[in-house]
Amino acid sequence: MHIGIDLDNTILDATSTHLKYYNIASGQSFTDKDVNDFYIYRLYGWNRAERDAIYHQYGHDIHWHSPPFPMAVEMIQQLFQHHQISIITARPELFRQVTLDWLKHHNVNYHQIALVENKLEQCISAKVDVLIDDGPHYAEEFARSNKSVILYEQPYNLSVRHDSVLRASNWREVKDHIDNLALKLKLTNLTLSDSM
Ligand SMILES: [Mg+2]
């Protein structure tokens, strides 16, 4: 199977590092308990341009210091043995190098990486079978397009309600979903080849 995996708040904890550097920039002291919006900068009352300026200043530190979630690296290493792994992130090109360095530093195995805003288009053109992501808008878009998606649970995506969206609150659950999907795909292929 070809598996697409998001980075921020899917493989790694981006909330804590965004809060740390956004607090430094603003003099505020928000904690993860205050976060209930995918767009963390809105907590600070910034508009998009203000956020972009601060993100450009602190983005390198934010991305370098974000810790991987428990079991994420181990589970991806296991998936890498049997599947095609694409990292698919909406981070800008500006942070490509720190992203590659972080993945190497934490021993994350993958075959390709794409830095793109339009993940649905990317997954269709690269023939990705399933995307793992925390973004509520991505989950809804994929579900509407009948594309498999595993939603990595975060406080701001609990309201996503689509029967076809699979949910995971840790990397063991992600791995279980992938194993089930791979089995289903195998059975479908067997049935297809039987009927030929
Ligand atoms: Mg994300």
Image (cartoon, rainbow, N blue to C red):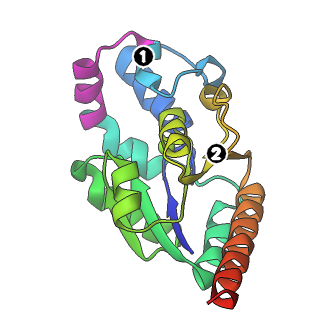
Residue 131 in percent (x, y) is at 53, 56
Residue 68 in percent (x, y) is at 59, 55
Which residue is labeled 1 in the image? 42
49 drawn magenta: yes
Which residue is labeled 2 in the image? 152
Residue 46 sits above or below residue 150 on the image: above
Residue 85 in percent (x, y) is at 50, 72
Q: Quadrant of the N terminus?
A: bottom right
- Mark 1 or 2: in front is 2
The residue that appears at 74% across and 51% down in the rendered structure is: 170
Secondary element under disc 2, as helix, strand or loop, is strand
In magenta, the rendered stretch is: 44-56
The residue that appears at 64% across and 52% down in the rendered structure is: 69
46 drawn magenta: yes
Residue 127 in percent (x, y) is at 42, 68
Q: How many neighbours does mark 1 have within 10 angstroms: few (below 14), some (14-19), or many (20 or more)?
A: few
Q: Amino acid at mark 2?
A: Tyr
Is 124 in front, or is 150?
124
Q: Amino acid at mark 1?
A: Arg
Q: Quadrant of the C terminus?
A: bottom right
Q: Earlier in the sequence, mark 1 or mark 2?
A: 1
- In the orientation shown, which residue stands out farthest toward the front? 196
- In the orientation shown, which residue stands out farthest toward the top? 45
The residue that appears at 53% across and 65% down in the rendered structure is: 129
Residue 191 in the figure: left or right of residue 19: right
